[in-house]
Amino acid sequence: MAIYTKSVGAFVSPLGLGIGAATTVSRSLNLRAAGNFFGYSLSGINSGVKYQGSLGFQSVQTSVDWFPWHRSFHVSPGVLFYNQNHITVHGGVAAGQSFTVNGANYYSAAADPVTLYGSVAFRRTSPMLTAGWGNWLPRGREKHFSFPFEVGFAYVGDPPLTLNFTGVVCDTPAQVNCRSIDSDPTVQQNIDAQRKKYQNDLAYVRFYPILSSGVAYKF
């Protein structure tokens, strides 16, 4: 009687497109590993600041699939590591144009227009916990394909946000009372308050949601 102990598969989740493999440890345990990747670019205008952003996902995950009743339901503790997930934003404000930071309105100076850089980075290593249905290594001899589904989370903590403005700002479009952003404590306070607002908005990804669906083939 042939024994099938290995499989390969592909899936999609909020971590991106995943490609992985699994092997049998015992009747109730599988060991699974996968790599995730995804990239996306976007552009727009927010509060008068024109920006271009990029979202890059690259990570590796390992999980132990435990089947408590030796059926398709499983609980899977794991680790997300080599986490290169990040968001970067570059932008600026054209000379003479207005923009808003923390409710305060400024104008970009013609001599040194305002530029923006922002970034969000995630922990390199995070614990994971998922549960779902479907076995990457279905136990029936005649079964080769499976369609696993799982939900859960990775605890990534609070991803730090960087928000930097540089250049010269003015109080009116006529370039009145212009000063460097770096030398004005009030402007710096508004930038920091705006950063904290964005940082609070990121709190919901502390427990990064995992919703995964895919297909696996055992051999």
Image: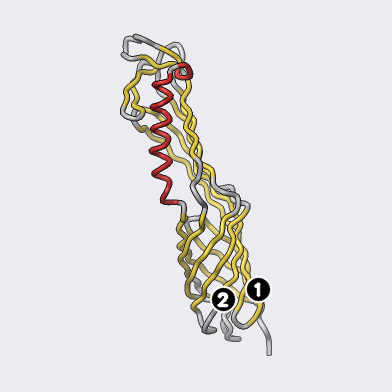
- Image position of 42 with respect to 142: above or below: above
Q: Which residue is mark 1?
A: 23
Residue found farthest to the bottom = 1
Circle 2 crowding by C-alpha within 10 Å: few under 14, some 14–19, many from 20: many
Q: Which residue is mark 2?
A: 66
Residue at (52%, 73%) from the top-left corner?
75
User: For the residues carrying marks 1 and 2, which lies nearer the camera in this image?
Assistant: 2
Location of residue 111 (image quadrant): top left
Q: Amino acid at mark 2?
A: Trp
Residue at (47%, 37%) from the top-left corner?
53
Q: Is residue 151 left or right of residue 84?
A: left
Q: Amino acid at mark 1?
A: Thr
Q: Quadrant of the C terminus?
A: bottom right
Q: CA distance from mark 1 to mark 2?
A: 12 Å
Element under disc 1: strand
Circle 1 crowding by C-alpha within 10 Å: few under 14, some 14–19, many from 20: some
- Image position of 42 with respect to 7: above or below: above
- Image position of 57 with respect to 61: above or below: above
